[in-house]
Amino acid sequence: MANKDEHLLGELARRNWIILVILVLASLPWRSAQVSLGVFGGGLVAIVGYMWLQRSLRAMLSQPSRGSAKKFQFGYFVRLAAIGASLFALVALIKVHPIGLAVGLSVVVINIIWTTIKRSL
């Protein structure tokens, strides 16, 4: 079981990209660039945010100290601001479809639910 746990993060990272490709391909029949771009942009924001969080957690856990926890908290707010700015740019400037954006943002959630169901069975 420990061997499965070691490869879990890599498996999640690969599956995020696979789910994003599937969702973008599923959005193509709508023949709307705003919908497909919303799915792609939302998925990209979700995946990059997930990878950023993973990297920050690894850095904090590799050298546990009071300073690393404060650095993680500061990085959390920076990440939150970057994600907020990205979402603002996608909606206000690029004018993506909000439902497509919501579908794209759910890439990591779909992946975690899928992995939870898969591992519990």
Image (cartoon, helix red, strand yellow):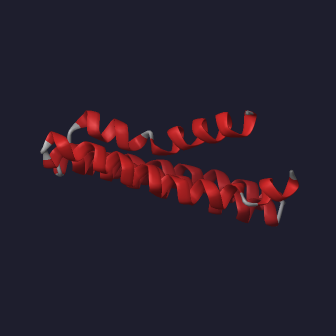
Q: Residue furthest right?
A: 2
Give the camera-side residue of 118 and 12. Answer: 118
116 relative to 12, above or below: above
Q: Answer yes or no: is residue 53 visible.
A: no
Q: Position of residue 8 (x, y in %)?
A: 70, 55
Q: Quadrant of residue 34?
A: top left
Q: Residue at x 38, y 49 (%)?
A: 22
Q: Residue at x 60, y 53 (%)?
A: 12
Give the camera-side residue of 107 and 76. Answer: 107
43 relative to 30, above or below: below
What is the tally of numbered marks visible in this picture? Answer: 0
Q: Position of residue 70 (x, y in %)?
A: 70, 54
Q: Position of residue 15 (x, y in %)?
A: 54, 54
Give the camera-side residue of 62 and 117. Answer: 117
Q: Position of residue 31 (x, y in %)?
A: 12, 45
Classify residue 62 as left or right of residue 84.
right
Q: Residue at x 13, y 44 (%)?
A: 32
Q: Answer yes or no: is residue 15 visible.
A: yes
Classify residue 21 as left or right of residue 47.
left
Give the camera-side residue of 27 and 37. Answer: 27
For the C terminus, the quadrant is: top right
Classify residue 34 as left or right of residue 82.
left
Q: Quadrant of residue 105?
A: top left
Q: Residue at x 34, y 52 (%)?
A: 86
